[in-house]
Amino acid sequence: MAYYAIKGGEEAIKNSLKYYEDLTKEAQKIDDDDLINGLTFSIDKVMSEGSLYSKKLAAVAIKRSAGDLLNASFFLRAHRSSCQRIGIAKELDVNTMRLRRRISSAFKDIEGGQVLGASNDYEIKLLVDLKNEKVNIEDYSNEDNIIKSALTPLREDNLIKVLKKETEAWDITRAFPNAPYPRSAVHQVMSRGESGSLLGFAYTSMRGYGDVHPTIGDLRIGELDIEFIHPFTKKDVKIGSIEATAVESAGTFNKDEDGQTRLTTGFGFCFGKNETKAISISIIDLSLYNDSYTVGTEQIVASDFEMMMHHVDGIESFGFANHYKLPHYVTFQADYQVFKSASKYVKEQEQKEERK
């Protein structure tokens, strides 16, 4: 189906793009490093949703969109699709993370202690200048700060439910799976999903459409080394490191498939400093993979794999919503003509009835 040709449309589009360039030109003057160091959470949000780990390119995308972070993620994802793939990195173990921040609300005393790191969770969030008391900040380095999850002792005692491990992780960028969805695919979709969407779905389960009310067993932010098998030497080589957030949420003790009572847990992982997103993923993970844990009926949206797999990606929903701004003249005119024809037919029938 073709759209009506509009005279002058191409020139109008060029002008519109020029106007947009003028509107966002001041943003282009911002130094990339200033964005990366100053708006660090915005950078990490765009990297995670754009599914491309590059703080530099995330800064460029934010400037290109003049601060529209969803649009910036769109730019980054589009760029990602044009990048050549040279191979697959080795699996990551979040227990090897060099920690910058690590807390647990399930245990007061944990190995390595509660490492609060940089956070404003403990601040009254008002738009006023709140002066913090003078404190003695201890010297701290994350180089040797590698600590296992606070849930490790329970896991070693076989008290945590273990899901069946996949022999090979699915790659949703190569082929999107059909149901039943592999867990690796589900987590890839959520890891690059839109933070607000994930929070919204997780919140439905927390407040009534389900009964997930977890405790944060282990929340960690830090650096992970990326290793790659060298194509010539076949040896493991470090090619870089990434900053990431990982969360293990603890649910309740339920009977496992073998009849043993174990703790249900949910896991969340994403690029950068993205605590709320990682927590949301872990809550949805809890809801998806523990049917006996939830209560209610089919209204439990966070337990619906189809709902999660097809409705949390911000790039897809952003593109779908915004495509309605593009020409739909033919489809609308078709509906309008059907309405007019139907109205005319109804009037004719009414007139016939009146003549009788």
Image (cartoon, rainbow, N blue to C red):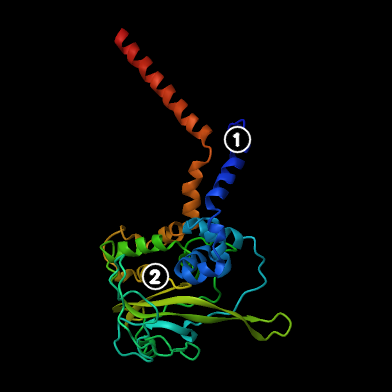
- Residue 256 visible: no
User: Which residue in the rendered view is the most extreme toward the top?
Assistant: 355
Question: Does 355 appear above or below 31?
Answer: above
Q: Mark 1 is on which residue type? A: Gly
Find disc 2 in the rendering and name its residue. Answer: 285
Q: Position of residue 317 (x, y in %)?
A: 46, 53
| Label 2 to label 1: alpha-carbon separation | 47 Å
- Residue 235 visible: yes
Q: Is residue 122 left or right of residue 97?
A: left
Q: Position of residue 63 (x, y in %)?
A: 54, 59
* Residue positioned 35% across, 70% down in the render: 283
Find disc 1 in the rendering and name its residue. Answer: 9
Q: Is residue 104 left or right of residue 72?
A: left
Question: Does 173 appear above or below 347?
Answer: below
Q: How many marks?
A: 2
Q: Which residue occupies the foreground of this view, 14 or 84? A: 14
Q: Position of residue 51 (x, y in %)?
A: 53, 66
* Residue positioned 43% across, 77% down in the render: 246
| Crowding at mark 1 (Cα within 10 Å: few <14, some 14-19, many 20+) | few
Say which element carries label 2: helix
Figure quadrant of the N terminus: top right
Of labels 2 and 1, earlier in sequence is: 1
Say which element carries label 1: helix
Q: Mark 2 is on which residue type? A: Asp
Figure quadrant of the C terminus: top left
| In front: label 2 or label 1 | 1
Q: Position of residue 22 (x, y in %)?
A: 56, 48
